[in-house]
Amino acid sequence: MDYDTCFETLGVESGASLRQIHSAYKQLALKHHPDRAPDDPESHEVFIRVTEAYSILKNAYFTAKGVPQRSRMKKCHRCGNYGTLLDGLDRKQYCPDCLLGRRRKLLPMPLMETIRCIGVFVLLATAVGLIVRASILGPRGLFLVAGALCIAGMGLLAYHVWSADLIKK
């Protein structure tokens, strides 16, 4: 059962406080308790769904130590699901599915990817340095080497962008 269904089952708005959730659960549990309506199977089913919804929402609000975790009940602005939210590179909060299931631009860059990008920047910086040096000193051979380094750097950058499509789960 997802969080939206839990909120609907208890009859409270999404993102309600734990006190509101507990109050709604208590009212519904007393109304549909099997001791109050022993011959009504529908009431028993409602009691089971209400109890399950309350358990899920209560566990989402508390960690193992009993400390309230309000951030767990926030809604991911990308997919709309409730859950633990993590900070992306754009300083917005996303659920883990959005962070792991989308392009890498939302995740911190792994060390190996950082090293690969540094290589591209070194190639391009060297090419710019050779162009400046060739413009001061004048030999045309440095322009050719700088052009080759620019083409190699752009090709390597294009390869990295093409290969960094999705992160495998």
Image (cartoon, rainbow, N blue to C red):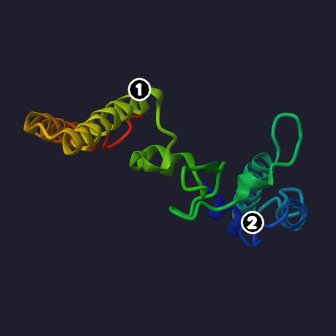
Q: Position of residue 95 (x, y in %)?
A: 57, 51
Q: Position of residue 160 (x, y in %)?
A: 27, 38
Of residues 92 and 74, the one nearer the viewer is 92
Of residues 47 and 4, the one nearer the viewer is 4
Dot 2: what SS? loop
**Circle number at residue 87:** none
Identify the residue at horizontal 41%, vertical 45% (top origin). 104
- Lateral position of residue 135 relative to residue 144, left or right: right
Identify the residue at horizontal 81%, vertical 49% (top origin). 69
Q: Callout 1: 10 Å neighbours few (<14), some, many (20+)?
A: few
Where 90 falls versus 162 (above or below)? below
User: Do residues under tags 2 and 1 come within 8 Å of each other at their CB atoms?
Assistant: no
Q: CA distance from mark 2 to mark 1?
A: 39 Å
The reply to whether residue 48 is visible in this rendering is no
Find residue 129 and report its image quarter.
Answer: top left
- Lateral position of residue 148 relative to residue 21, left or right: left
Under mark 1, the amino acid is Met
- Lateral position of residue 116 relative to residue 63, left or right: left
**Circle number at residue 15:** 2
Dot 1: what SS? helix
Identify the residue at horizontal 69%, vertical 60% (top origin). 74
Which residue position holds label 1? 112
Where 13 falls versus 137 (above or below)? below
- Looking at the rendered structure, the number of numbered marks drawn on it comes to 2
Q: Position of residue 73 (x, y in %)?
A: 72, 57
Mark 2 or 1, nearer chain start:
2
